[in-house]
Amino acid sequence: MTAPALDRTSTAELYDAHVMKNYARAPLTLVRGRGAQVWDDAGNCYLDFTSGIAVSALGHCHPHWVASVQRQAGELIHISNLFRNPNQGELARRLVGYAGPGRVFFCNSGAEANEALIKLARLHGVEKSGGEEGRCYKIICAKNAFHGRTFGGMSATPQEKIQKGFRPLVPGFSFGELNNVQSFADLVDEQTAAIFVETIQGEGGINPCTPEFLVGLRRLCDQHNLLLLLDEVQCGIGRTGRFFSYEHAGVTPDAIGMAKGLGGGFPIGAVWVHERHAELFHPGNHGTTFGGTPLACAAALAVLDVIERDGLLEKVRCNSAGWAAELRRLAVDFPAQVLGVRGQGFLVGVQLSSDPAPYLAALRERGLLAPSAGGQVVRLLPPLNVSPDELAQSVEIFRAVLAAKA
Ligand SMILES: *Cc1c(COP(=O)(O)O)cnc(C)c1O
């Protein structure tokens, strides 16, 4: 037997030839990661404040996460939801501990979690209209929102670049102004079933709901028997220094969508539903083959273990305060380029006065990886366990880029 010929085609060539062209990708091939650092195929090291878009909550290859996933992979990986597995039960218990009395449904992504929230709203609408299907089905979302790329998610995402080419969309969605309760109240009619917002808009440019706004939406939902659905896919799982970012406002939602940081890099999504509404899903009316596998739940349990054991919520609150202050100084020192800094904890947006693309490239050249967000924003999403040194380094790099471009 002869060994297969060594394939010398570069990764860039393989992508050019064979990978779907639906992403704008940085010209970088990453091969290894540890904590907040990643290395490319030429051996260059970067500070990774992308975290796989707010996914790698513990950084890359955290030893406890790796050991848990390795152990579980050798034990039992997938069984479907035709049977119980201990990890899913335990993970549900832990999430209920954070969210409150209720039940958890597991899926595989943020879009799928949100799809379940939209379906929950439909079921609530049927109950609200006395069992008449299709009479009460409308959902009010926020302008500039992002809820995912499925038909339900896209329909809740009022952005031309996301909806264009895919119409007709799912009917029944309308859009209020973020942080303007009256604009949501004006959209409520007898066919409305739910209000659905991101607690902090991520893709839209790091736009937080104010606590007063969330309290106002809660009151509006109570007045009209609507579900308050919160998309915590990006802002949840500790990123803002509370497990869920709505905790800062002291409201209780009717249901929560989560994903991204939950698996620390392993795909998993989840929906928590308040016990008041937890019976709306029943055997047969929703499901997914891969939801809550022993392996995915082991990954998520490892993330929660480290968040709890290492006091990461406290650390995020502590370490982000000085960092945010340093970032706000950039707006003071470079007012022509930096218009402001928004966000909370390690979900931060630096508002630029021009297209962020050249800035992202310059940051990358100096060793900092970060994604953009809508409205000319550079997003900074370090892992929750990033060190104060690494945070300081990120500000230094950002400052050097601004100075070079000033
Ligand atoms: C990323 C994101 C989604 C979609 O999650 P996927 O896992 O990409 O499907 C939905 N909502 C918000 C707020 C997100 O940030």
Image (tube, rainbow, N blue to C red):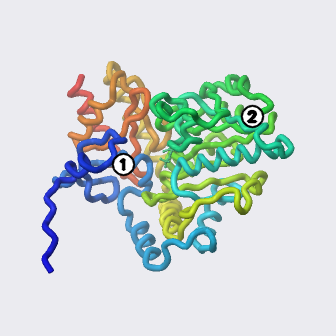
Residue 351 in view, yes or no: yes
- The residue nearer to you, when weighing 292 against 240, is 292
Q: Is mark 1 within 8 Å of ligand 1?
A: no
Tell me whether circle 2 and circle 1 mark residues in contact (CB < 8 Å).
Answer: no
Residue at the far top: name it: 336
> Which residue is located at x 48 percent, y 73 percent?
77
> Which residue is located at x 37 percent, y 26 percent?
352
Of tags 2 and 1, which is closer to the observer?
2
Q: Quadrant of residue 251?
A: top right
Vertical position of residue 132 compared to residue 299: above or below: above
Vertical position of residue 30 compared to residue 2: above or below: above
Instruction: State left or right for residue 368 relative to residue 377.
Output: left
Quadrant including the C terminus: top left
Q: Quadrant of residue 405?
A: top left
Give residue 18's position: percent from left, percent from top. 28, 50
- Residue beneath label 1, please? 388
Q: Identify residue type, mark 1.
A: Pro
**Other-residue count near label 1 (Cα within 10 Å), few / some / many at <14 / 14–19 / ≥20:** some
Quadrant including the N terminus: bottom left
